[in-house]
Image: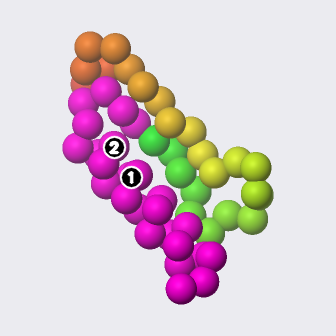
Amino acid sequence: MDSKMIEDIDVNAVKLKSERSAVVSTYLASNDKEPLWDGHLYVYKNNGKDI
């Protein structure tokens, strides 16, 4: 497995887990070229995604 394939698997796993959560929302770029930034992870209080 190359590093791109590993990153894609990891990003998809985080996206899938956050989609099932009522309090976590993500913005994650796939196949990006910036080594220090891969996206945002938002954590809300009290089911904040529904507001």
Point out which mark residue 15 bears: 1
Residue drawn at x 31%, y 54% as measured from the top left? 16
Residue 32 % position (x, y): 67, 64
Q: How crowded is mark 1: few (under 14 residues within 10 Å), some or many (20 or more)?
A: some
Is 45 displayed left or right of 32 in the figure? left
Residue 39 can be seen, yes or no: yes
Q: Which of 7 and 26 is in front in this view?
A: 7
Residue 51 can be seen, yes or no: no
Residue 7 % position (x, y): 55, 67
Residue drawn at x 30%, y 48% as measured from the top left? 17
| Amino acid of disc 2 | Ser
Report if residue 51 lies within the magenta region. no
Does 48 appear above or below 24? above
Report if residue 23 lies within the magenta region. yes
Point out which mark residue 32 bears: none
Residue drawn at x 25%, y 20% as measured from the top left? 47
Residue 13 % position (x, y): 37, 59
Q: Residues within 10 Å of mark 2 (few under 14, many from 20)?
A: some
The span shown in magenta is: 1-25
Is 6 displayed left or right of 17 in the figure? right
Is 45 displayed left or right of 38 in the figure? left
Label 2 sits on residue = 18
Does 24 appear above or below 2? above
Magenta stretch, overall SS: helix
Q: Is mark 1 on a helix, strand or loop?
A: helix
| Amino acid of disc 1 | Lys
Does 35 appear above or below 39? below
Query: Are the residues tagged 1 and 2 within 8 Å (C-beta)?
Result: yes
Residue furthest to the top in view is 46
Residue 51 placement: quadrant: top left
The Cα–Cα distance between marks 1 and 2, rounded to whole angstroms, is 5 Å
Q: What element carries label 2?
A: helix
